[in-house]
């Protein structure tokens, strides 16, 4: 069973950033001590009543607190809630079909002052995870003894908990970014501009598929990741970048908009896209093209809205190291005449006909919480639609983004590797920097009206 105190977890994150910076010759700029979210792993309790632990299937792995029922509690020591001011508290939870109740966070004792209450409802299974978020107007300052108290009128277990997080700032920068809040005034103005747009008339004969795209060529490679390890060049595995040619470890929404050079068409798309680098026989194989599709998989896409400026998210799991034989989800495939003619010796990679090439399609979530540009795991602010719609903690319908990446190789029995490891570790990052008007008009014309458009946004 793991035991990670909050203070040690936070300290080690800071030490790692300093060590990496020193090794790489970086000068870290001073920032607020509360610039990153404090994450408390549920299994790191100092005391508990009625709580078990189990291995979690959630992103990042590890353990979660399990078998939680009415009256159970956990105590966490030295949880630093930061200076006075508003606070965003979050809980990563999963619940089965009969799971209803609340998780109360209290300070000092199980009956102490109430900090936050998270309502619990079924999430689709005991390892089907979602993030509940609560805005706290005021809170006690500095390190606290924090109790998580379980309340339910339903007999038996009703919830699992993976972690809690507390963010009193923007969460930008550093080695452990947290929740990045949307600029509400800017987002309201962008939405108003979008809603005022007049949709273009759809010509007769147009294919009625909600879709437009950006066609991109390979730009450059760096061992950087401005979403996962911002401000720390060389701290990531190697990535192959597409789109904005300025993208590096120090990329911000402002820097993307300031650099007008992109490897994508249209020119109004200044976004950054990246994937782990592919290797064959120890040599990098760079993509001969990537199409970024923006569309909808919902029965009714009419409620779709564009991404806010600075929005970012990740699809896939760089830590996944499992076999991907033929027929597996998330597998690479062969596109072109002849298709797949065999498998690599380890079974994880296709061998393509000489007239075909290696391809992968990576699909991103299509529902958003409407509050955050990013989250601690870069995934909790988004979710995949359930039962053909967005709702619950992620009520805002956003375009369904997918990367279709092709490589100028047919493969061989030796197979390939990724800079992140096995084929199963394929993942992608999207950092939005579209021109608002260009993106909004495409969403209005192509997705909302269910009409297939090209890279120029034309039917």
Image (cartoon, rainbow, N blue to C red):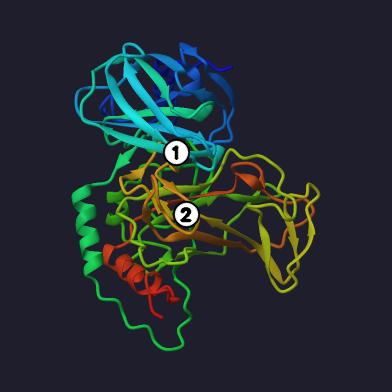
**Please, is residue 223 above or below residue 151 in the view?**
below
Rounded to the nearest whole Å, what is the CA distance between mark 1 and mark 2?
17 Å
Q: Nearer the viewer, residue 336 or 382?
A: 382
Q: Residue at x 39, y 23 (%)?
A: 14
* Horizontal and vertical percent position of residue 49: 49, 13
**Please, is residue 60 above or below residue 306 in the view?**
above
Residue 37 in view: no
Quadrant in which the N terminus is drawn: top right
* Horizontal and vertical percent position of residue 262: 39, 62
**Please, is residue 171 above or below residue 222 in the view?**
above
Displayed quadrant of residue 372: top left
> Which residue has dot 2 on it?
385
Q: Residue at x 81, y 49 (%)?
A: 345
Q: Nearer the viewer, residue 101 or 146?
A: 101
Q: Residue at x 48, y 29 (%)?
A: 154
Query: Dot 2 lies on which element?
Result: loop
Quadrant in which the C terminus is drawn: bottom left
Q: Residue at x 65, y 52 (%)?
A: 329
Query: Dot 1 lies on which element?
Result: loop
Q: Residue furthest bottom?
A: 204
Q: Nearer the viewer, residue 53 or 30?
A: 53
Q: Nearer the viewer, residue 384 or 4?
A: 384
Q: Residues within 10 Å of mark 2 (few under 14, many from 20)?
A: some
> Which residue has dot 1 on it?
121
Residue 332 lies left or right of residue 341; in this view the side is left
* Horizontal and vertical percent position of residue 286: 58, 57
Considering only order in the chain, which callout, 2 or 1, is on the residue closer to the N terminus? 1
Residue 34 in view: yes
Q: Residues within 10 Å of mark 1 (few under 14, many from 20)?
A: some
Displayed quadrant of residue 446: bottom left
* Horizontal and vertical percent position of residue 32: 25, 27
């Amino acid at each position: 069973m793991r035991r990670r105190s909050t203070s040690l977890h936070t300290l080690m994150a800071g030490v790692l950033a300093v060590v990496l910076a020193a090794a790489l010759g970086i000068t870290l700029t001073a920032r607020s001590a509360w610039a990153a979210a404090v994450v408390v792993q549920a299994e790191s309790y100092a005391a508990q009543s009625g709580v078990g632990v189990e291995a979690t299937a959630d992103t990042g792995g590890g353990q979660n607190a399990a078998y939680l029922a009415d009256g159970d509690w956990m105590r966490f020591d030295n949880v630093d809630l930061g200076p006075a001011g508003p606070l965003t508290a979050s809980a990563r939870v999963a619940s089965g079909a009969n799971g209803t109740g609340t998780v109360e966070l209290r300070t000092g004792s199980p009956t102490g002052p109430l900090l936050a209450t998270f309502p619990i409802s079924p999430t689709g299974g005991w390892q089907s995870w979602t993030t509940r978020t609560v805005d706290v107007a005021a809170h006690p300052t500095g390190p606290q003894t924090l109790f998580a108290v379980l309340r339910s009128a339903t007999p038996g277990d009703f919830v699992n908990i993976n972690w809690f997080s507390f963010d009193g700032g923007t969460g930008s920068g550093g080695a452990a970014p947290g929740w990045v809040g949307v600029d509400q005034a800017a987002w309201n103005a962008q939405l108003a501009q979008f809603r005022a747009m007049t949709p273009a008339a759809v010509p007769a004969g147009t294919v009625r598929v909600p879709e437009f795209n950006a066609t991109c060529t390979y730009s450059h490679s760096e061992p950087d990741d401005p979403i996962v390890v911002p401000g720390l060049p060389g701290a990531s595995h190697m990535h192959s970048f597409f789109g904005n040619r300025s993208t590096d470890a120090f990329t911000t929404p402002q820097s993307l908009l300031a650099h007008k050079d992109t490897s994508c068409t249209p020119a109004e798309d200044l976004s950054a896209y990246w994937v782990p680098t592919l290797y064959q026989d120890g040599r990098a194989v760079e993509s001969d093209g990537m199409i970024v599709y923006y569309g909808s998989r919902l029965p009714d896409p009419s409620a779709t809205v564009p991404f806010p400026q600075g929005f970012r998210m990740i699809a896939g799991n760089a830590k996944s190291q499992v076999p991907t034989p033929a027929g597996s989800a998330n597998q690479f495939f062969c596109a072109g005449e002849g298709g797949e003619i065999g498998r690599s010796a380890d079974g994880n990679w296709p061998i393509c006909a000489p007239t075909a090439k290696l391809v992968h399609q990576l699909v991103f979530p299509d529902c958003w919480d409407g509050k955050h540009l990013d989250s601690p795991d870069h995934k909790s602010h988004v979710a995949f639609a359930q039962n053909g719609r967005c709702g619950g903690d992620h009520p805002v319908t956003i375009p369904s983004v997918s990367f279709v990446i092709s490589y100028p190789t047919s493969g061989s029995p030796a197979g390939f590797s990724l800079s992140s490891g096995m084929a199963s570790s394929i993942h992608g990052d999207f950092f939005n920097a579209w021109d608002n008007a260009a993106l909004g008009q495409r969403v209005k014309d192509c997705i909302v009206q269910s009409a297939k458009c090209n890279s120029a946004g034309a039917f």
